[in-house]
Amino acid sequence: PLAPAEFEAASPGRRLFYRICRGPFGALPYYLVEMWWRKNFLPIAPEARRRWRNHVFDSAFAVLSLFAMIAAVIAAGRYFDPAKPIWLIVVLGWLLPFLVWNWLMGVVIYVHHTHPDIPWFNDQSKWKAAQVKLFCTAQVRLPQPLHVLSNNIMEHNAHHLDPGVPFYHLATTQERIRRVTEGMIFLKLGFRSYLDIVRQCQLFDFENARWVRFDDLKARRSQ
């Protein structure tokens, strides 16, 4: 998240995009632009660009696979319904599922790391001292059938502690961790609980270690 001072110093376009990403439907544009496009598809984000040579093979594979997938969708669509226009085949057969996937991934990442009780840090020493793998990520229970389809990735504390734990062992590992650890965050996700997080977690005051809403910033300006 941006600090209030960073948000106010940003360009109007950057502030608008940030507000959209921190809104109820922000998980889609955030993941699509900041994660998929700038890091997963092409390493153009500053933190990924420094090691661009390490990503050449992966990026080439991702780009070629994307075009091959779209071509396969078009071929299958034309085979089953030759009269259907290509643009509609692409929209229904690739673009719509792709956007739904980006939205779901964005929600998953957001609720893992964003909560009124989860602090963020701009100091690495404080970040290490906070035991972030245990206390700065949430265990989330998704509504069914999404929870079953999530393949246990919502047991996120265990995943952070040891990324090598297979997905089919994450639930058991998470339960063992919870038995011996107090203060871990558990969230039963629903539409209302998601909106509560969105309303409260908009900007982060790193000096005072607390979340700030856009309305709080507006009220501070008017004083």
Image (tube, grey):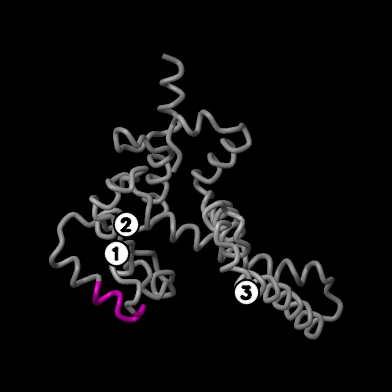
- Residue sitting at the far bottom: 79
Q: Which mark is residue 142?
A: none
> What element does badge 1 sit on?
helix
The magenta stretch spans which residues?
Answer: 166-173
Q: Which mark is residue 157?
A: 1
Relative depth, front residue between 192 and 212 = 212
The amino acid at mark 1 is Asn
Query: How many angstroms separate mark 2 from mark 3 (CA)?
Result: 32 Å
Badge 2 or badge 1: first in the primary sequence? 2
- Residue sitting at the far top: 223
Relative depth, front residue between 148 and 129 = 129
Instruction: Indicate the quadrant where residue 156 lies.
Output: bottom left
The amino acid at mark 3 is Phe
> What element does badge 2 sit on?
loop
> What element does badge 3 sit on?
helix
Badge 3 or badge 1: first in the primary sequence? 3
The amino acid at mark 2 is Thr
Task: Give the residue at mark 3.
Answer: 57
Instruction: Indicate the quadrant where residue 53 lies.
Output: bottom right
* Point 35% across, 80% down: residue: 166
